[in-house]
Amino acid sequence: MGGWVVPTAYLMGAGWYFAICVIAGIVFGSWLDGQTGLKPMFTIIGVILGLALSILGGYSLLKPFWLRLNNDSLGKGK
């Protein structure tokens, strides 16, 4: 197999992480809205928190990938 399999799997895992964070924020916020009767408030807060968590966690997930990719491309240029 080519050298594309590992990076593809790594990026797919990061994509799933982003999706799960946002969807979990929506589901939990919607559930809290149903419990409290404050219809859009907790859903919006859940979306914002899910996005923030996905950005912070995604950065820490992808930082080693970016560094490795950058180092590999620098080594090939020499």
Image: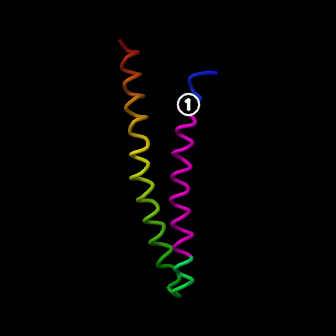
Q: Quadrant of residue 30?
A: bottom right
Whole-percent x and y of residue 11?
A: 53, 39
Most common secondary structure along the magenta stretch: helix
Instruction: Tell me which corner region of the image, top left, top right, bottom left or bottom right, holds residue 12.
Output: top right
The answer to which quarter of the image holds residue 71 is: top left
- Against 21, residue 39 (above or below) is below
Q: In the rendered image of this protein, does residue 70 appear above or below residue 49?
A: above
Secondary structure of the residue carrying tag 1 is: helix
The span picked out in magenta is 6-30
Task: Give the residue drawn at x 38%, y 39%.
Answer: 63
Q: Position of residue 28 (x, y in %)?
A: 53, 71
The type of residue carrying mark 1 is Val
What residue does disc 1 label? 6
View extreme (bottom): residue = 37
Q: Mark 1 packing: few (<14 Cα in 10 Å), some, or many (20+)?
A: few
Check the image and report above or below for 9 versus 49: above
Q: Nearer the viewer, residue 29 or 39?
A: 29
Residue at horizontal 45 percent and vertical 55 percent from the top: 54
The residue shown at (47%, 69%) is 46
At x 35%, y 11%, the residue is 78
Q: Residue furthest top?
A: 78
**Image coords of residue 5 (percent x, y):** 59, 29
| Residue 28 magenta | yes
